Amino acid sequence: MSKTIGIIGCSGASNTGAYSDIVARKLMKSGKAKMLCLARFSIDEKFSEQMKKEIDEYIVLDGCPINCAEVIMKKAGIDTFTHINTTDFGIVKSKTPVTNEKVEEISEFISKSISEGIIKT
């Protein structure tokens, strides 16, 4: 039986947030993960509880070291997840332009991690 993987991107206003959002959407479109709304986790306790039942593994993709997505997920009572930050891929907040090459690099890293089963459960 396959596991349901949820991906939550910070989708912040900077280039790093754009990377997070684009990568999450790419993985959703490829069928590798179900993209979930970060903002909803912060305001909808019933949604958070429902997702705890439906999602087997979470990938939290933050854009910068402020780690908004990680903080929101923990406040929503979800603290077991794989946390990835776009800055871990050499992206500098407010400086590195958004490129397809970097999107592919991050997407491939996450896809490979899913395939190899190294996403935390």
Image (tube, rainbow, N blue to C red):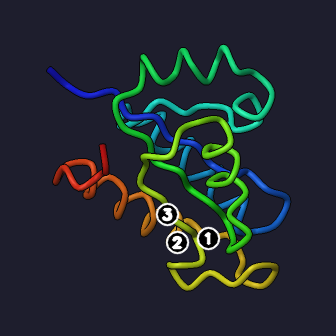
Q: Secondary structure at mark 1?
A: loop
Q: Residues within 10 Å of mark 2 (few under 14, many from 20)?
A: some
Q: Secondary structure at mark 2?
A: helix
Residue placed most toward the observer, 58 or 107: 58
Amino acid type assigned to the residue bearing label 3 in the image: Ile
Q: CA distance from mark 1 to mark 3?
A: 18 Å
In the rendered view of the protein, which quadrant contains the N terminus? top left
Question: Residue at label 1?
Answer: 99
| Image marks 1 and 2: residues in contact by CB distance under 8 Å | yes
Name the disc covering residue 8, or none: none
Q: Residues within 10 Å of mark 3 (few under 14, many from 20)?
A: many
Q: Secondary structure at mark 3?
A: strand
x and y, in percent, of residue 12 in the image:
79, 56
Residue at the (74%, 69%) spot, across then down: 66
User: Is 67 left or right of 104, judged from the image as shown?
Assistant: right
x and y, in percent, of residue 108 in the image:
35, 60
Q: Earlier in the sequence, mark 1 or mark 3?
A: 3
Q: CA distance from mark 1 to mark 2?
A: 6 Å
Query: In the displayed structure, would residue 33 be above or below residue 110?
Result: above
Question: Residue at label 3?
Answer: 84
Q: Earlier in the sequence, mark 3 or mark 2?
A: 3
Residue at the (43%, 58%) spot, across then down: 107
Residue at the (68%, 53%) spot, across then down: 71
